[in-house]
Image (cartoon, coloured by chain):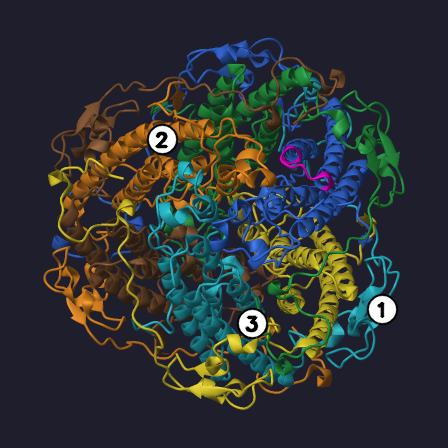
Chain colours: A yellow, B cyan, C blue, D green, E orange, F brown
Amino acid sequence: MFYHVKELQYRAKPDRPNPVYAKKLQEILGGQYGEISVAMQYLFQGWNVRGGDNKYRDLLMDTGAEELAHIEMLATMIARLLENTPEVDLDQAVSDPVVAAILGGTNPQHAIVSGAGAMPVDSVGNRWTASYIGASGNLLADMRANLTAESMGRLQAVRLYEETDDRGVKDMLSWLIARDTMHQNQWLAAIAELEAKENVVVPSTFPRELEKQEVSYTLFNYSAGNESAKGRWAYGPSMDGCGVFNYVENPVPFGKKPKLKPAPKWLHDTPLNVIRTSDVHPDPDTK
Amino acid sequence: MFYHVKELQYRAKPDRPNPVYAKKLQEILGGQYGEISVAMQYLFQGWNVRGGDNKYRDLLMDTGAEELAHIEMLATMIARLLENTPEVDLDQAVSDPVVAAILGGTNPQHAIVSGAGAMPVDSVGNRWTASYIGASGNLLADMRANLTAESMGRLQAVRLYEETDDRGVKDMLSWLIARDTMHQNQWLAAIAELEAKENVVVPSTFPRELEKQEVSYTLFNYSAGNESAKGRWAYGPSMDGCGVFNYVENPVPFGKKPKLKPAPKWLHDTPLNVIRTSDVHPDPDTK
Amino acid sequence: MFYHVKELQYRAKPDRPNPVYAKKLQEILGGQYGEISVAMQYLFQGWNVRGGDNKYRDLLMDTGAEELAHIEMLATMIARLLENTPEVDLDQAVSDPVVAAILGGTNPQHAIVSGAGAMPVDSVGNRWTASYIGASGNLLADMRANLTAESMGRLQAVRLYEETDDRGVKDMLSWLIARDTMHQNQWLAAIAELEAKENVVVPSTFPRELEKQEVSYTLFNYSAGNESAKGRWAYGPSMDGCGVFNYVENPVPFGKKPKLKPAPKWLHDTPLNVIRTSDVHPDPDTK
Amino acid sequence: MFYHVKELQYRAKPDRPNPVYAKKLQEILGGQYGEISVAMQYLFQGWNVRGGDNKYRDLLMDTGAEELAHIEMLATMIARLLENTPEVDLDQAVSDPVVAAILGGTNPQHAIVSGAGAMPVDSVGNRWTASYIGASGNLLADMRANLTAESMGRLQAVRLYEETDDRGVKDMLSWLIARDTMHQNQWLAAIAELEAKENVVVPSTFPRELEKQEVSYTLFNYSAGNESAKGRWAYGPSMDGCGVFNYVENPVPFGKKPKLKPAPKWLHDTPLNVIRTSDVHPDPDTK
Amino acid sequence: MFYHVKELQYRAKPDRPNPVYAKKLQEILGGQYGEISVAMQYLFQGWNVRGGDNKYRDLLMDTGAEELAHIEMLATMIARLLENTPEVDLDQAVSDPVVAAILGGTNPQHAIVSGAGAMPVDSVGNRWTASYIGASGNLLADMRANLTAESMGRLQAVRLYEETDDRGVKDMLSWLIARDTMHQNQWLAAIAELEAKENVVVPSTFPRELEKQEVSYTLFNYSAGNESAKGRWAYGPSMDGCGVFNYVENPVPFGKKPKLKPAPKWLHDTPLNVIRTSDVHPDPDTK
Amino acid sequence: MFYHVKELQYRAKPDRPNPVYAKKLQEILGGQYGEISVAMQYLFQGWNVRGGDNKYRDLLMDTGAEELAHIEMLATMIARLLENTPEVDLDQAVSDPVVAAILGGTNPQHAIVSGAGAMPVDSVGNRWTASYIGASGNLLADMRANLTAESMGRLQAVRLYEETDDRGVKDMLSWLIARDTMHQNQWLAAIAELEAKENVVVPSTFPRELEKQEVSYTLFNYSAGNESAKGRWAYGPSMDGCGVFNYVENPVPFGKKPKLKPAPKWLHDTPLNVIRTSDVHPDPDTK
């Protein structure tokens, strides 16, 4: 269950409105790696934690609840960046390049649809979709998804930091960037714990002799040129400590050419022997 | 540029048709973490690698090309699982539970839409979308996304392995599972290399003093109960070696209650002072 | 900012697992009118409330926070309905109709993707999308969207109540249905307040003489047959008190046939005068 | 069955082309609350009306057919706004701010994809999706969805009216705004009729004693601060006349902390007791 | 503008309800090549026809209006197939395989969401999306899209015809299949007219010498094996009469290996020279 | 199985960076008819070819593999068009119209999300979706879909050619346009072969007497005005040689008004006879 307090986790006030930047900032609110994504991902992962050690569930709920606060901060910031939105018109652009820029660089839905409010969309206007998130029922896989999301999210926040001179925006982003530093650190810590317990290949509980172990540590060179042979992944012990990397420079197929059986008649594939419908005497018993 | 050979990377032949399993197997072909996702993710990441050390680009292209071969194997397997698809009818289900099961457990589009062929969809029929993939222009973030995808993908392949007794299907899955073992190992190796070069927090090049460092290593306990205080992420040196984790049991807000300015008149928010349109004398100068 | 407590708002425990019902119950978790939709809709509306009377913002945040708790209850219930999920196989269906039913009636992603956990999807497996929600910057429009969502949501919860005999599930649904009773009542109360202030047509602040008032209260009979003339909407004073309904039995067009100008050459529409490319001497100055 | 006449319901001719405004106007053609949405929503609701009083079905078909005419008007207007679309180039923008604005503010698909024609998209280019519409098999719920759609739609049309000085566009919008006035009035009239028959909580036929009536009229204060206690929804008789609103300032959980059973082995959750795969002797009987 | 009559274009009455078939039949109502797709495609193409010969616009509007009638017939048929929908329960499946089949083979949203009504979805429950349709501003391209849609649609209708024994359903499908015969014929006729005017390669107005004509009639053999050399496309005069097909057995690249410039610093790619953030002295002038 | 070589099929190097054009060029990479669409469409069709004459499968694989090379060329070109992307700010737009244009006309995700790399999106930022493609298990239907895709794709490439003066971009487009010339020719050749074998109406194997032949060649004039009577489709022998076109000027309905049975009680439609819940004594046996 959740309680809300009206104060923000951290302040979210720009120096001045800027509808063009408001459009961009939507990326880390409602984009693929935005705050809605991490909030929903952590909460669903948390709710689905089964049995065992509740510290993971607790950590997920702690962080999920925090991400809800980040959605709120960004929604507030975007609403403020949209204040004083003018009605702009093409004619005004003739004499005023700023108007021209505003005309082109804003999200028109911020005026027409949300009435100067934040939306659950990314920086080009795609609506948020749960296709962005993962919760698998395997803790290590989930923690890796979380580390990925925080890495992508911090990268985007940093780029947005670089794209503005507004001190209020930079102030808020410096908070979010710091929190992403923590969140990358915490998922790394969780991953370290889990990998120490069960090794690094997910899932660790699948019996190794049931996989084709002869290709479990092989790099096939399907892209001409051998630059990839120089990496750590091409020689030496494998990262899971269970094998040795090897490199196959000229990989050949292990299977044959497939040939599929003809489709049953009722699926009506194009027949490749000559029949012209106009000449056909229909089958009285088609089915 | 790509060349295709007709032989499969590995054989893809089931013992017998099974349209119910064909529906399920679609998950690792066209689902969120299926082969289309990894193929497209690695290829886009590879094409976007800039400057520097080409071994990463080469590794991405090697693996992207391999994933195309896996799409092909799965498409072939699914087409074979769909062979001899009967026309089933509700009436037949009265006397035959297997027919009843087939009726319910298949994807009707496998008959109506694809004519007994594989489709770019997941196990419930959602069409594949590029919302599933990431390519960020930051190698470490991308490698983490790749490790996540392979962890999720191997987990799903293992679950599908458990859900069948068909030896032909299990044979093919044992190949794919082994390749996922390699791919997890190789992305782990790449991550190790990259982290050794630039530390673990992505992006590493953002000046640390520009973030609010006072909360860069803090776990806020937003979910009542202190189980999360027991984890490695709550005390001791941080994973990036740049700070010390600390735990805040009763976090309070750092910001104030936000209050947004009223909307400009032309956005037509509901006015909260009493006006009834029927009484209004229209403003001659509305704009 | 949000705080989470680990206790559920209300208990969510089924009598027994039932993966077929788990699939159905997803509708009111992650469907068009499910709990994710109302949570996100109320929160975004709340964050975007501008100026004026904060009781609406507060009410929206109260209810948005509650809906987060409902997501949690449903996620918990679905996870429990998925416990003891067997690995089912087509062969077992031969002798066991229940197995046959399970095989067909479950969501395969509950096994393959989420590992027996709830997902942000509806009852057929569509991922939740923010295309479901609205937050317009006009309070009355938003409150009507909220009343709609609660009406749809309660209707679906009632139908799901009818589709099960599990007392634990029915117990939880009786809670959610009661809360939907309250939420319909509260949005009705808010609507009554707002309509009393500004009349019923949204937005109320648009000057009436700027619309084509001659058709503001006219029912055009575009569907042959006059049944619709019998409704309250076809005669008498209009609901906004500003006009009188009238009924036009045989409506005619008010506009002319449109004729669009030819496309500029550079858009390459099919030319309808005879030119064969093979005869064309290319224009040396194509642009 | 439908007949089409070539004349428009009302004229749709701008004073002059304006590709930037064409992009915006798409919102009420192909957006969430645009004319495609209301046309499809009313038609599907109409086709699904069961038994009973055909005046509702007739009204839905009347209005659905009209909305098809509105799609046509908007498509025509947008095609005209796109006439004379120049080929614009970045170099031209150096000396001409209008070109710069056009460059930025247009939808590039209006040139590349539709060849100066209207598209079934919103103002940022999202393709129309049936996720926008509802048809529930409950008339009152449907009528509320319709009132919501017309409220949102009129609000957006009014904002678009404010954003242009083109008299031809304003003329057409004044028609659409008037029709939205009628449509809000007519759905309000239908709602009044239906609520008079069956009370206000949808669905009205669910036995009241089957819901947890102790919380059917309770406002839980999940957002700190008591502003919401001041509204009509917090005291006095409920809107359905069946209860009395009450306000709970400090709501506590009614349920317990959930604890989910461990996942079955075959789902391969991360094991939280120490096992390293490299040490494991595989289980000979994995399934 | 559109007028609706209440009579159906053709009768749509099944012998008996069948919710499993109702789910399947949705494919040709709301699927990729269903009636919503063709209705919307023809109407948008018609509205966007520019200048010239109005017989194409008229034909598109004729057919678009007819497809609206087909949506109506299918919606009616599906609603009737859903009549008498029982509340089914897992327990009943124990003793009744038909119940088991129904349980699995139906679309749960037909009960929960639409209340026994048709929906704008396909046979697996994906909501209809305008991503399915095309309207390009080039008549010949559009007519080919139309021929494709009718070919796909008739194929699906035929497969659905084969999958049922219900005489009422077969009767209605035999109407739709006949209309698809006409529609394929009519688009073929239009294509023949247009190709006679402007040759077969779309668009025909692009000057031939501006394309790399040396590869305009070349088949590159990128898939090992020469079966494709046997087709009409590999030798002889090209279909447009402007060239001669030729076959390249061993195609080589014409371009070089691409090498992209390093990203600018502010995009924060992973640096591949060794820097550890913990050692970095921050740049005082980061931007 | 696929092999990759690092050289491009053809060079992809612009004269100079241009982020505005990069956004537009995305249309033919990740749009509805872009290179991802044709690559995936041909590969899935190829993998699903059953039995019979392998030259079709081989041709599909040849061309599918080539389209992968085109994705690569476009990805490379877009990455280069994005080089030297400046950090632009609203303030700079005051004095510099080019900056203003760039601000508005670029895809912000090219900076924030992909870090100056190509993305699997179209020119407005919609992510690629497999809803764009078709593979039906009927060769003739598939070939028509392919001809459509190449017609649309070439049209879009030509429009993009017209929209730029960059010689490097034009050079690459002249290659792609030439390949589209070939691909239209080759699918036309395949269609000619297949139609010669089995006539023109897909599928050709459905017995003609099972369709309602009395309307198989009839044009119904549902759109007032007789322009459409002038086309080849309205008189003379049909294109399939099996009938004679005829024109019905005033088509009437063949079916009756549908009337659906009332919904079962458990679906809770709004009851249209008067019952007020507040007066209802609940049914003790609700189910």
The answer for which chain carries disc 1 is: B
The residue that label 1 is drawn on is B247
The residue that label 2 is drawn on is E166
Residue under disc 1 on the same chain as residue under disc 3: yes
Where does the image place residue D284, in percent across and percent down from the top left? 57, 74
- Given the image, on which type of amino acid does mark 2 rest? Asp
- Given the image, on which type of amino acid does mark 1 rest? Tyr
- Given the image, on which type of amino acid does mark 3 rest? Asp
Q: Which residue appears at 58% of the width and 19% of the height?
A: D186
The N terminus of chain B is located in which quarter? bottom left
- The circle drawn on residue F130 is none
The residue that label 3 is drawn on is B142
Secondary structure at badge 1 equals: strand
Where does the image place residue D20, in percent across and percent down from the top left? 48, 45
Where does the image place residue C105, in percent across and percent down from the top left? 54, 45
Query: Which one is in front, B1 or A208?
Result: A208
- Residue A200 falls in which quadrant of the image? bottom right
Disc 1 crowd, CA 10 A, few/some/many (<14, 14-19, 20+): some
The C terminus of chain B is located in which quarter? top right
- Residue C21 falls in which quadrant of the image? top right
